[in-house]
């Protein structure tokens, strides 16, 4: 079967750094994406890794290790507005995005 | 760029009626559109994939006769929930992709359906 595992909840304080891990098992792998979703809103694209290594986009970075079927999203200099759900997603060999269950990030003052 | 709209943003309907949700790509042509359903505090579950001009491909467990999908043009896909029941109440989200080689999907704002 296809599955993505990520922690259900993470709490951190403003200004801190938080890492959200994601392990996957899918039929085919064409990249790992990360999406942010605020309550009641649509998912917004954050980052994409097709190859091993670190991709940096402002305060957000994403890492991928294909040999370990593992990736993570790193959020630096946390702000209150970063409180949201974060989903990792794998594009499988049919072109579909398979989403993880999501990690709820709560940023506290 | 790459904006996807959905209409309506929310809808309340009575049990047994049908509801149509529209998904439009505003500034690009979407060769493929996806329909997801999301229950509160849960992940996005893919319902079906639609390619312009062809029949939609439904995921296992999704009733194609209940959730009718039409992808009539490169900028419009519709999802019709037929004979809606309270258990169909959910957040329905569409997304669009510009081409088979494109890795990024652009999501619409979602439609909150409540069936009473």
Image: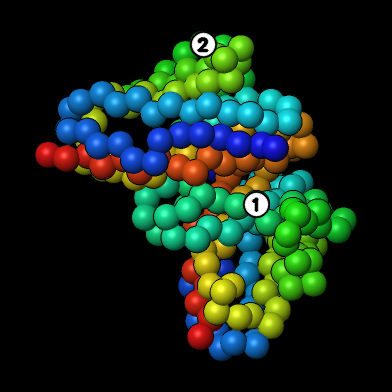
Q: Chain of mark 1?
A: B
Q: Position of residue B4 (x, y in %)?
A: 57, 53
Residue found at the very far right of the displayed protein:
B54
Residue at image position (62%, 40%) is A98
3D distance between C-alphas at marks 2 and 1 = 28 Å
Given the current orientation, which residue lies at the most extreme left position?
A109
The residue carrying mark 2 is A53
> Nearest the camera: B8 or A102?
A102
Q: Label 2 crowding class (10 Å Cα cut-off): few <14, some 14-19, many 20+?
A: few
User: Circle 1 sits on which residue?
Assistant: B46
| Neighbours of disc 1 within 10 Å: few (<14), some (14-19), many (20+) | many
In the rendered image, is residue B41 in sight? yes
Q: Secondary structure at mark 1?
A: strand
- The residue at 53%/58% (across/down) is B38
Q: Is residue A2 above or below residue B95?
A: above
Disc 2 + disc 1, Cβ < 8 Å: no
- Coordinates of residue B67 in the picture (x, y in percent): 72, 69
């Amino acid at each position: 079967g296809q599955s993505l595992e990520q922690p259900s909840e993470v709490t951190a304080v403003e200004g801190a750094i938080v890492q959200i891990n994601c392990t996957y098992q899918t039929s085919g792998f064409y990249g790992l994406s990360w999406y942010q979703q605020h309550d009641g809103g649509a998912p917004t694209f954050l980052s994409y890794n097709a190859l091993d290594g670190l991709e940096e986009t402002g305060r957000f970075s994403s890492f991928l290790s294909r040999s370990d079927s593992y990736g993570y999203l790193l959020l630096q200099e946390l702000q209150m507005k970063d409180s949201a759900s974060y989903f990792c997603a794998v594009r499988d060999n049919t072109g579909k995005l398979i989403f993880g269950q999501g990690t709820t990030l709560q940023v506290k003052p | 760029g790459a904006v996807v709209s959905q209409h309506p943003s929310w809808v309340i309907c009575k049990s047994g009626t049908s509801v149509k949700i529209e998904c439009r790509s505003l500034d690009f042509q979407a060769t493929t559109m996806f329909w997801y359903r999301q229950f509160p505090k849960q992940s996005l579950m893919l319902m079906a994939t639609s390619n312009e001009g062809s029949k939609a491909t439904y995921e296992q467990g999704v009733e194609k006769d209940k959730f009718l999908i039409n992808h009539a043009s490169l900028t419009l896909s519709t999802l019709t929930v037929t004979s809606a029941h309270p258990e169909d109440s959910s957040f329905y989200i569409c997304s669009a992709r510009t081409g088979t080689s494109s890795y990024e999907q652009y999501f619409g704002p979602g439609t909150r359906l409540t069936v009473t």
